[in-house]
Amino acid sequence: MTPTAAKTLRATVASVPGALSLAVFLVICATALAAPILGLPDPADMAFALYQPPSAEHWLGTDNFGRDILSRVVWGAQVALTVAVGAALLSILIGSALGAIAGYFGGWVDGLLSRVFDIFLLIPTFFLILLIVALFGASLPLTIVAIALTTWPRSARLMRSQVLTLKSRVYVQAALAAGAPHWWVIVRHVIPNGIAPIITDGTILMGMAILTEAGLSFLGLGDQNLVSWGSMIFEGQRHLRLAPWMSIAPGVALLLLVASLNLLGDSINFAMNPQLRTRGGAPKRRATTAPPAGETAPAADTPILEVDDLRLVYHAGARRIAAVDGVSFTLPRGGSLGIVGESGCGKSSLGSALLQTMPNNAELTSGTIRFDGRAIVLGGKPVVENGRSRIDALRWTRMATIFQSAMNALNPVTTVRRQMMDALRLHKPGISREEATARIAEVFAMIGIPASRMNAYPHQLSGGMRQRAMIALSLILEPELVIADEPTTALDMLIQDQILGEIADLRERLNLSLILVSHDMGAVAESCDVVAVMYAGRIVEIAPTQRIFGNPAHPYTRTLIGALPSLTGPLEELESLPATDTAAAAAATGCRFAHACPAATDLCRRAAPPAVPLGAGHVSECHYAEDFAAEPSSEPHAAPAAAKEARA
Ligand SMILES: Nc1ncnc2c1ncn2[C@@H]1O[C@H](COP(=O)(O)OP(=O)(O)OP(=O)(O)O)[C@@H](O)[C@H]1O
């Protein structure tokens, strides 16, 4: 068994329906295979008494010819399974191959093959099977071929649509650009990524094949020499009053096998798709809480956002990943906070926790979030007021977000203007068309998109323009707080700089509060008053921007600043760090940075550092914070200007 197959099997049996359906399917298979050695009477033997009800001698009774029903059900399973596996395999092989060719090559090949699929789909399935059986006679192999011939277009269409999506993926393009031949790209990249729904559909096909064979036998069109559940049910219904057990036993066997196959299909799909698995499948109902008693109206100087001891864990199978592990900060109204740190330190998880847009496998285990003085999360639970969660009422209207990749965040089949119109109408149901159009034009002008581009689809805009459209969408409802998660990551330096400049400008003009999530120290230096440095799920240092660059008081911050290149200073080797295993670092007894810290001592490895206040809003989680703070950062990375210069 290949490692992938073993992993899929493990994941399949990890769920109750998966384990149960696999167990039922395996028991039926094992019983069918073991039929000759089970010591059961011959299924065709008519030596027994007729119409005997279930007894110790004949567990499931006997039929109208005195044949043992248990033996016939067991031998009938062989026929059912042979038809199921044979027809489904043949159907998937023909369908997937033709579907992959049609989707991959497109053009006239796709046109021609798609018409063939359509023609086959138009032929009534049962009629075609009847025709084949009538022309060539009834036999098991012919029944299998007939079923496969009528079902393969299902697999073909499914595979074609999968391939149409997959072939534009970057990894497929990259393989072609690397000189891989088409057949290799199809076999190595396209089919493995598109096969999961085909396999799921295959289990449904197996169920269909069993039912079709049973139906044919029921009509007397099956192979009369074989024991089939369909023919047993047919016989049974003729003697229903006299001997109901004759149809109950094959009926239950048929139901169990088809139901277990369908359930198995769902479980395999779930197991094969890591996204479904680690995202936790269907959304779990999250516990909520009522607003706290004694909440007062916010004062003018109430911070726009207060976060206290926020903790978020991801459930990935048996693993728990503490992505945000006790984060606290306060953002004053109109203020801007940059959250920086290496990839995987928990920046995006923190952003999604603030907006409560986490994936299904994420759980807030503790913490409080207050927006404008009112709690939106208490003890890790969303606050619900009058049947509606407070965050739902705030999201987009008062707290908006700018996503990382505008191409993924904007709907590709709707114009940018339409998406803005939808957002306006959703949140301001009374707004007239003219008012909405005027507001859209205003925001477009503000963000520098020419009015002529308003009706463009996202793919018709350049990367920079698309990101501007995303910013416009976030500002359309005049929010007070914007959370921007890597808003310029995919853009070139020049456009990055322009967009960051525009965000800073808008912030001043609209008195926006801003949280900028970025791995780029230069970007936050340029746009934010305060910088929070995250490491392995915690904010290890927070300080006003000038201070964090001038007097970094955490060795990790120093390393981040040391990794900024200088174009004008003398050539220096840049500092680098080994990649951090977030889970391992979070589990460390002492300081989570100790394993990579050049200044770590025994104390660091033994005890978690306290949060050391250094004045003027500067806090560092390091045992030696005061010593580091007293030692200014070495040139040329001493100030935000240097960081900006490094980016330019
Ligand atoms: N849906 C998920 N399921 C399981 N683990 C996850 C999930 N999303 C993120 N993680 C893990 O949580 C940790 C923090 O991830 P997060 O995406 O918040 O980091 P980040 O700092 O934003 O990284 P980047 O800058 O690369 O986006 C990482 O260890 C990541 O592997």
Image (cartoon, helix red, strand yellow):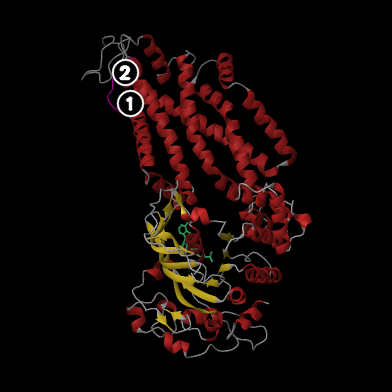
Looking at mark 1, is its residue's CB closer than 8 Å to ligand 1? no
Task: Please state if 618 lies on the left or on the right of 92 as rendered.
Answer: left
Q: Is there any visible trace of residue 183 in the rendered image? A: yes
- Mark 1: give few (<14), some (14-19) or many (20+) Cα within 10 Å: some
In the current view of this chain or complex, which residue is farthest to the left? 56
**Label 1: which residue?**
36
Q: CA distance from mark 2 to mark 1?
A: 15 Å
In the current view of this chain or complex, which residue is farthest to the right? 452
Q: Residue at x 69, y 55 (%)?
A: 439
Task: Please state if 167 lies on the left or on the right of 349 as rendered.
Answer: right
Provide residue 449's location: percent of width, then percent of height.
74, 60
Provide residue 528's location: percent of width, then percent of height.
58, 74
**Vertical order, 302 against 222 (above or below):** below
Provide residue 241's location: percent of width, then percent of height.
32, 9
Amino acid type of disc 2? Ile
- Mark 2: give few (<14), some (14-19) or many (20+) Cα within 10 Å: many
In this rendered view, identify the residue nearer to me: 53 or 420: 420
Provide residue 120's location: percent of width, then percent of height.
63, 26
**Vertical order, 257 against 624 (above or below):** above
In this rendered view, identify the residue nearer to me: 190 or 295: 295
In this rendered view, identify the residue nearer to me: 400 or 646: 400
Highlighted range, magenta: 36-44
**Label 2: which residue?**
69
Is 189 magenta? The answer is: no
Task: Please state if 102 lies on the left or on the right of 32 as rendered.
Answer: right
Task: Please state if 331 lies on the left or on the right of 36 as rendered.
Answer: right
Amino acid type of disc 1? Pro
Q: Main secondary structure of the magenta part?
A: loop
Q: Which mark is residue 569?
A: none
